[in-house]
Image (cartoon, rainbow, N blue to C red):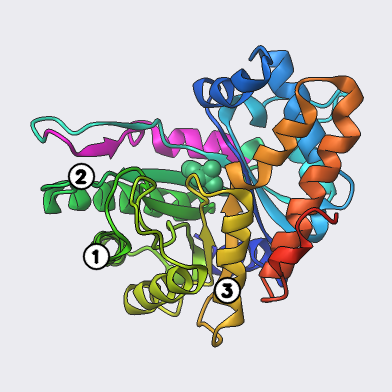
Amino acid sequence: MNIEELKSVAAAIVDSQKGVLAADESNPTIGKRFEPFKVESTEETRRRYREMLFTADGIERTIGGVILFDETLRQITQDGIPFPKLLASRGIIPGIKVDKGAKALALRPGDRVTEGLDGLRERLEEYQQLGAQFAKWRAVIDINDHDIPSAFGIRANAHALARYAALCQEVGLVPIVEPEVLMDGAHGIERCEAVTARALEAVFAELDAHHVLFEGMLLKPNMVIAGKQCAQQASVLEVAAATLRCLRRYVPAAVPGIVFLSGGQSAEDATDHLNAMNAMEPQPWQVSFSYGRALQAPVLAAWQGQEDNVSAAQNALLNRCHLNGLARAGKYARTMEGTP
Ligand code: 13P
């Protein structure tokens, strides 16, 4: 493990205005994203869509890293340039999603655990040869009205995240550690905060036990937010305050950056929340984004699979990147929406 290299890649991904574009949807997930627009999901439509994202002029100002799916890491542009090479030539660090998805945890009804550890060392070595410099693993933590997540479920996911992170650092890839407490449900913001706290506490205990270097990783958490079906939604300031309170209690200052997932928030809400956090007092880590839907939803709506819409779709991406770049400095205002 080259400590200086890990530190410098992690720092570059969250440099100044920058964050991460999560474009690592698995094939079934990107199929779901295409469906409302009647875009058929084929290897070629997925390739064309991702090429459109990665060639949008100017995204490198606010995108420090892009997370790719296995298929995308191996694809090439129309002109024959491998996607990782294209991104690197623009100063954007290519990364790779390496988990194999959340499955039911055996004999533990209601809890899920993420699979993908078997053979991971060899896969990481191959991904690195293909140009990846960081990786991502997502643990999914469900909340129900009763006893989910269980303490055991949280521990199982924390353990898998730490095994993954240690393997990444061993081969020289920066791990993005993603324990995602889902927004699905009618729970209030307090329940989300309590579960997020337990998850982060368990994750950092396991990372430490596995000798993961905090300085050479990034954390990708959920924001602390009420469940989507909860009648009582918290204000932007409440979300920002609860999220920072929770992170400050459980995330070591040695971690260089927090890159939030959007998790089903609207693009505008995700930007607003990020902005509010950066407008509060300075934090020990960079407070940034690693959005999938909150960056891409407006792009898909503008594109609709039509070649004629490519430039409008690229402008939609650039606009979201720009606004999130401002939110990194606490300089975004909701009134900026609609004025790209
Ligand atoms: P969302 O921002 O759409 O939640 O996606 C981020 C991600 O990478 C989920 O794993």
Front residue of 45/195: it is: 195
* Quarter occupied by residue 276: bottom right
- Disc 1 residue type (three-letter): Ala
**Pointer 2 or 1: first along the chain:** 2
Q: Quadrant of the C terminus?
A: bottom right
Magenta span: 109-128
In terms of sequence position, does the residue under pointer 3 or pointer 1 come before the other? 1
Residue 48 visible: yes
Type of residue at label 3?
A: Ala
**Residue 276, disc:** 3
Where is mark 2, residue-wise?
Answer: 144
> Where in the figure is residue 42, as x and y percent of width and height?
66, 12
Q: CA distance from mark 3 to mark 1?
A: 21 Å
Whole-angstrom CA distance, mark 2 to mark 1, is 13 Å
> Spatial distance from mark 2 to mark 3, Cα to Cα?
28 Å
Q: Secondary structure at mark 1?
A: helix
Tag count: 3
Is 165 in front, or is 54? 54
Mark 1 and mark 3 in contact (Cβ < 8 Å)? no
Give the camera-side residue of 279 and 42. 279
